[in-house]
């Protein structure tokens, strides 16, 4: 293999790595998560980068395992984020899982569930995958109870 081709490949990979590092360090650390009247938004300053309507969200949960970056739409703000991760499961879209990393995930999770219930008129969002699928019988305990 030609040495020049290998060096060009390594330079391009290094350049992409530097762009990713700058994105994660400078831009992603400034994301704000905003819960509105009818939608959830990811913002930088006053600029809305991403918006999801509450009607499109089927559940808000903490992941049972670490999601690979290809499995979800990632709007993470930190490098080590396993203890801060929340997953919004959507009803439509290319990526059905939407990953965020708020500072206080339990508070954001309950606020988001309340806002979704108020907006859509539901009593509450389902908590476990069994409830989402409708497999929980009345009076039956879920694995977390």
Image (cartoon, grey):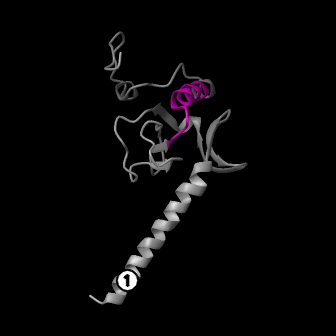
Is residue 126 toward the left or the right of residue 141 in the image?
A: right
Q: Quadrant of the N terminus?
A: bottom left
Q: Please give the name of the residue rendered at 48% of the width and 49% of the height, measured from the top-left corner.
A: 74
Which of the two residues, 40 or 77, is positioned nearer the viewer here? 77
Q: Read off the magenta span.
A: 100-115
Q: Which residue is mark 1?
A: 7
Please, what is the dominant secondary structure of the magenta stretch? Answer: helix
Q: Is residue 142 above or below residue 4?
A: above
Residue 42 magenta: no
Q: Depth check: give the residue in front, 125 or 13.
A: 13
| Image location (x, y in percent) of residue 49 | 63, 52
Which residue is more in the foreground, 13 or 137? 13
Quarter the C terminus occupies: top left
Q: Is residue 106 left or right of residue 11?
A: right
Q: Residue 100: x and y, percent?
A: 51, 42
* Residue 21 coordinates in the image, percent (x, y): 50, 61
Q: Is residue 96 left or right of residue 34?
A: left
**Name of the residue lying farthest toward the left:** 1
The quadrant holding residue 26 is bottom right
Placement of 109 over or under 3, stated as above or below: above
Instruction: Report the residue at 35% width, 9% height from top.
Output: 139
Residue at (41% x, 72% y) in the render: 13
Residue 110: image quadrant is top right
* Rendered location of residue 113, percent (x, y): 55, 27
Q: Is residue 63 left or right of residue 100?
A: left
Q: Tag 1: Cα neighbours inside 10 Å, few (<14), some, or many (≥20)?
A: few
* Secondary structure beneath label 1: helix
Q: Relative to 74, does residue 12 appear above or below in the rendering?
A: below
């Amino acid at each position: 293999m030609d040495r020049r081709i290998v060096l060009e490949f390594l330079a391009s990979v290094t350049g992409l790595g530097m762009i990713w590092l700058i994105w994660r360090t400078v831009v992603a650390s400034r994301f704000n998560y905003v819960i509105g009247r009818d939608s959830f938004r990811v913002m930088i300053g006053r600029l809305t980068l991403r918006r999801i309507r509450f009607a499109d969200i089927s559940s808000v949960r903490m992941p049972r395992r670490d999601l690979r970056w290809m499995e979800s739409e990632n709007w993470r703000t930190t490098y080590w984020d396993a203890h801060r991760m929340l997953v919004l499961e959507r009803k439509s879209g290319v990526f059905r899982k939407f990953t965020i990393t708020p500072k206080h995930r339990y508070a954001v999770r309950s606020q988001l569930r309340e806002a979704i219930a108020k907006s859509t008129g539901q009593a509450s969002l389902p908590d476990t995958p069994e409830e989402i699928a409708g497999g929980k019988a009345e009076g039956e305990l879920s694995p977390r109870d």
